[in-house]
Structures are given as C-alpha cells and as structure tokens.
Amino acid sequence: MNDTTTDIPTRDQGYTLRLFYAGDEPNSSRARANLQVYIRKRFDDSFSWEEIDVLETPAIALQENILVTPTLEIFAAGSSSRVLVFGSLDNKDILDSILPLVDDHARQR
C-alpha cells in the first residue's frame, strides 16, 4: 500500500493525525479500519489524516522515533509536543478522551 495523504491540516491550521502502520499486518489493518470508521462517524468528510506504511518508508518512522506499529501520532496546532496512541485503536474511549479538541477544530471548518 502507498502512503495516503489528503487534505491534511498543517500544525498551524489545526491538528495533524498520522497513522504509522506495517503493511497488511492484522493490527495495522485493524487500526487503519478503526481510525477510518471513527473519524467518519465523529467528524465530517473534510477531516483527514495521513497514513504511513513503515515497511515502504521506514525513514519517516525512524525520523519521528516511531518504533512500534500501529501508532497514531497527534499534533495540536502551534505545538511541538505530540500524543501517541499505540495499538489497533479498538478502544474508542481512548480516542474520545484524546480527540475532543480535534472535534472542536472540525466544527470550526
């Protein structure tokens, strides 16, 4: 699979979500599907994220110090800090606790 990047807000405009995954491995496939369903249910269709297959582009993962997949990386606007969520993203409560500010950003668009 190729990296997917569409309409991703910059760190200055809102939030950047990047999902690092490892090809078609089961946890990676589940994380990709779970994130897509979660985002589409919670936000409008204009909200997007970047997917990075570390098997195809390992340099990006190494540059970002991503050593475990799947990993969801979340940057807030104007911040140099990030939140990392590991695993298949099955637990929606964790995403709900981390993404309320992202929800506010999506409503402002």
Image (tube, rainbow, N blue to C red):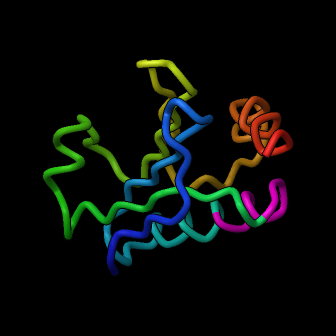
Residue depicted at 72% across the width and 37% down the height: 102
Residue depicted at 83% across the width and 54% down the height: 42
Residue depicted at 59% across the width and 37% down the height: 15
Determine if the magenta segment contains residue 43: yes
Hey, which residue is sitting farthest left in the picture?
59
Q: Name the foreground residue: 73 vs 43.
A: 43
| Residue 26 located left or right of residue 44 | left
Residue depicted at 81% across the width and 60% down the height: 44
Q: Where residue 82 sits in the image (x, y, percent)? A: 46, 26
| Residue 105 located left or right of residue 83 | right
Point out the image quarter for the N terminus: bottom left
Q: Looking at the picture, does residue 27 appear above or below residue 59?
A: below
* Helix, strand or loop for the magenta stretch, by majority: helix
Q: Where residue 9 sits in the image (x, y, percent)? A: 55, 46
Tell me the quarter of the picture where residue 97 sits: top right
Q: Looking at the picture, does residue 23 appear above or below residue 84?
A: below
Q: Which residues are magenta?
A: 36-44
Q: Looking at the picture, does residue 25 appear above or below residue 15?
A: below
Q: Where residue 76 sits in the image (x, y, percent)? A: 57, 27
| Residue 108 located left or right of residue 33 | right
Q: Name the foreground residue: 21 vs 60.
A: 60
Determine if the magenta segment contains residue 74: no
Q: Where residue 40 sits in the image (x, y, percent)? A: 77, 65
